Amino acid sequence: MASGKHILKWSGIALAILAGLLAFLALLLANLDWNRAKPWLNRRIGDALGRPFAINGDLSVEWRAAPDSSGGWRRWVPWPHVTAQDIALANPEWVEAAPNMIKIRRLAFSVAPLPLLRKLAVIRDLRIDAPRIHLQRDADGRNNWTFKQDDGQAPRWDYELDRLIVSKGAVRFIDGRRKADIHAAVDTLGDTEKGAYGIVWSLSGSLDRDNVSGEGRAGKILSLQQDGTRYPVTADLRVGKTAIEVEGTLTNPRALAALDLRLKISGVSLGHLYHVTGIVLPETPPYSTSGRLTGVLNARGGDWRYERFRGKVGSSDIAGTLEFQAREPRPLLKGEVVSNLLKFEDLAPLIGADSNASKIRRGQAPVQPREKALPVEAFKTERWKSIDADVRFSGKRIVRKKELPIDNLVAHVRLQDGMLTLAPLNFGVAGGKLSSRITLDGRDAERLKAELKLSARHFKLRQLLPTLPEMHASLGEINGDAALTATGNSVAALLGSANGEMKTLINQGTVSKLMLEAMGLNIGNLVITKLFGDRQVPLNCLASDFKVSNGVMNVRTFVMDTDEAALYIDGKVDLAQEKLDLTLRPDTKSPRVVTLRSPIHVGGSFKKPAVDVDKGTLAAKAGAAVALGIAAPVAAALLPLVNLGDPTDNPCGPLLAQASKKPKAPPPGTSTGR
């Protein structure tokens, strides 16, 4: 019994001593001049980060009661509350724009003491007053936010942050790669502000020569302490002529787990989004879209899905879903886009075929010369290696000019390591189908290589030229094939260097007699046909065969043969110079009254073609008529102007055999000579 009292006595004495020591330690810590520890702290933190660090102002520590959220006996353990004035973290030596990466007027936080023993900093309140942050990356990718890595021997510290309050903050971001210089201001809304938002921010600056401006709000800071919180955000941004509106939530903002936003984007061209997102999109007319953007952030940047979006591109509607996947070595963009009503002219900017006025509206220089018909605007192949793509597009109904017999479009666009493939790229044309496969190798930005394989099937003759009344009753189908290779950085350059073959044929059908008479300059029959009506003439065949060499289309064969007439075409079309040099030779097979049948020359440029009749042949015919008119009756004077026809067989058999052979093209970059 005595021994029990003895133990209790000494236990009480030990507890009293321990309590006294703790009280003395608490008193000592409370009255300790922490400023004397600043040199040691500055040196240790600077060594850990690999650059100078300094607390230039006052450093103090107060011991406060544990927050109410601490349970059990731990709530009786006081928490240190640290306050530091005038903190600076220097920039690396290569950064010249600002001496410090971080400059803070006042920093205050409370930290749980016991988790520090496990290398865990649990910070309950972090208040930052007037921070000035300078972030910079140069053109080579070097940045000032990557610090010295530890040697792996010292255990790494982890941290948990429950509350963050920033007042009067300013951030400047300079990026040599993106040519960006952006200023941001961040502040906490006052307690009198009502609603879900607690932070307000604004942006200004430039991005790749475009002005940047914007503003937005985010949720109350206190919501950071709750897992699973849907943290509200809203933003209104402008980058050049691109406007972006965002409203939605960030799930679990402490871990940046996921985003769920309503996203609206509008601008003068989808191609301008490359400067904002790094995603390669084609040049287009002005557009606007609205949809749901969801994303999961990860170490690579995150995976994003822009789903069920709808909008307009020019006068065309678009809808669909696109996914962006951050992966190595390049991110991937995939999805499907549909246009129920596609205006054909809205496709022109994709290849630079829109007008100079349209180019100016979308921020491009008016590069198209007045005398050039083929687009000279260069492809931006330097962007093609930044992303891979797998996107399907369909235009269900096409609104176009009357002379264009196109009614639908289906395309599958794939971009892989700088190689752009459109396979298929199919159009509905004149009741038939134009199927094509195009490969553009942009891995060499200075020398784009292209391959084209094209197949035209079942084009209805009556629909091919809808504005020509004489074709409305014509029957028959046109089929054709082309195989071309080329090098160049624009449509004009590619066609101007093309090599390969192009072939078309019609093996049966009918054509307008009026059109035949007009092509043969058979004036008398033309008048008679006009007076007494047109009729259809059986078409034996139409066959064309072009050999393309270094941008020059040379006619190897071009014949249209009917029971009453034949038309032969010789010459060439220079795609590089955009010049025509063709000769049409009509040949009638039956008697014609008052025919001026002569070669017809088609020359000039694509912009200004010129059609001329062989004046020498006409003069000879006219001279003979005058001579006969002097010595013979009027009927005899008409003999030189009457063609009695040629009874020889039509040439369709060998022509169809030749035209039906598949065209061939040499490898890209091959020069075949002219």
Image: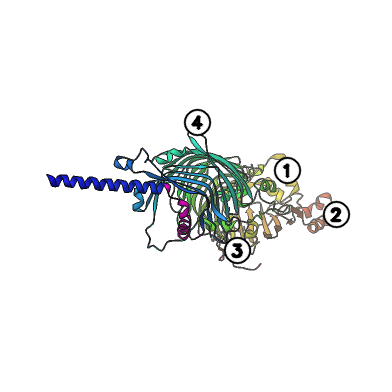
Which three-letter amino acid code belongs to the residue tagged 4?
Answer: Lys
* Residue assigned mark 4: 194
Which three-letter amino acid code belongs to the residue tagged 2?
Answer: Val
Looking at the rendered image, the disc whose residue lies closer to the viewer, 4 or 1, is 4
Is residue 43 highlighted in magenta? yes
Is residue 657 highlighted in magenta? no
Q: Can residue 312 be seen in this view?
A: no
**Nearer to the camera, 188 or 89:** 89
Say whether disc 2 or disc 1 marks the residue closer to the N-terminus.
1
Q: Picture coordinates of residue 166 (x, y %)?
A: 50, 43
Say whether disc 4 or disc 3 marks the residue closer to the N-terminus.
4
**Tag 1, which secondary structure?**
helix
**Tag 2, which secondary structure?**
helix
Query: Where are the magenta residues, as a range?
Result: 31-51
The C terminus - image quarter: bottom right
Residue 528 is marked as 1
Mark-to-mark CA distance, 4 and 2 = 102 Å
Say whether disc 3 or disc 1 marks the residue closer to the N-terminus.
3
The secondary structure making up most of the magenta span is helix
Mark-to-mark CA distance, 3 and 1 = 57 Å
Q: Picture coordinates of residue 221 (x, y %)?
A: 46, 39
**Tag 3, which secondary structure?**
loop
Which three-letter amino acid code belongs to the residue tagged 1?
Answer: Ile
Mark-to-mark CA distance, 2 and 1 = 24 Å
Q: Picture coordinates of residue 525 (x, y %)?
A: 73, 46
Looking at the rendered image, the disc whose residue lies closer to the viewer, 3 or 2, is 3
* Relative height, residue 544 to residue 511 (above, below): below
**Nearer to the camera, 442 or 35:** 35
* Residue assigned mark 3: 447
Looking at the rendered image, the disc whose residue lies closer to the viewer, 4 or 3, is 4
